Each structure stands twice: as C-alpha cells, then as structure tokens.
Amino acid sequence: MRTGKYRVRSGINAYGHKYWWYVLVGTNGKTLDTSEMYVSKQGCLRGVDAAKRTALTATIEEVK
C-alpha cells in the first residue's frame, strides 16, 4: 500500500533568515496541504507531528 508523504523544505526569506515548512503530498504526487512557516527545523517537525495527530480525529465543518 502506498501512502502520502510529508516533505520538509527550507528557504531563505528577504531578510536572509532561514525558515522551514512542510508539504503533504498524496500518492498521486499532488500537494494536499502546505504548512505555515517555522523558524526552526525542530518546530517544523513538531508541526508535522501535530498535523498527524489532529488528522486522525478531525471532523468536517462547513462554514457559511
């Protein structure tokens, strides 16, 4: 069975500071979700863990 992947990426902002974010990619290679920007890789990895935990129990809410 194939599963999606969390890809951790990094970049440099206009002020020269390094930042991190993750992208959730489905089995078809399409982007499913993109995170906020984090100031550390450790913070980004904690964000991935939080997203994994939350997704297991998340409900769908329609907002009008």
Image: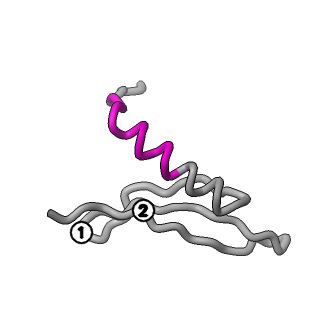
Residue range highlighted in magenta: 48-59
Q: Quadrant of the C terminus?
A: top left
Extreme residue toward the right, this view? 15
Amino acid type, mark 1: Asn
Residue to which mark 2 is pinned: 6
Q: Nearer the viewer, residue 32 or 58?
A: 58
Q: Looking at the rendered structure, which numbered label has been put on residue 28?
A: 1
Q: Between marks 1 and 2, how big is the CA–CA gap?
A: 13 Å
Type of residue at label 2?
Answer: Tyr
Question: Residue at the spot x=46%, y=62% of the render?
Answer: 23
Judging depth in this view, the residue of 63 and 50 nearest the camera is: 50
Q: Residue at x 73, y 74 (%)?
A: 12
Mark 2 lies on a secondary structure that is strand
> Looking at the image, is mark 1 or mark 2 nearer the viewer?
2
When the figure is inspected, residue 24 is found, relative to residue 10, above or below; the finding is above
Position of 22 compared to 5: left or right? right
Does 42 appear in magenta? no
Which element type, helix, strand or loop, lies under badge 1?
Answer: loop
Residue 47 location (% of width, % of height): 55, 49
User: Circle 2: is it few (<14), some (14-19), or many (20+) Cα within 10 Å?
Assistant: some
- Nearer to us in this view, 35 or 62: 35
Determine the image quadrant of residue 18: bottom right
- In percent of width and height, residue 50 lies at 50, 43
In the rendered view, tell whether residue 44 sits above or below residue 14: above
Quadrant of the image occupied by residue 57:
top left
Main SS category, magenta section: helix
- Report crowding for label 1: few under 14, some 14 to 19, many 20 or more residues within 10 A (C-alpha): few
- Please identify the quadrant where the N terminus is shown: bottom left
Q: Is residue 9 left or right of residue 16?
A: left
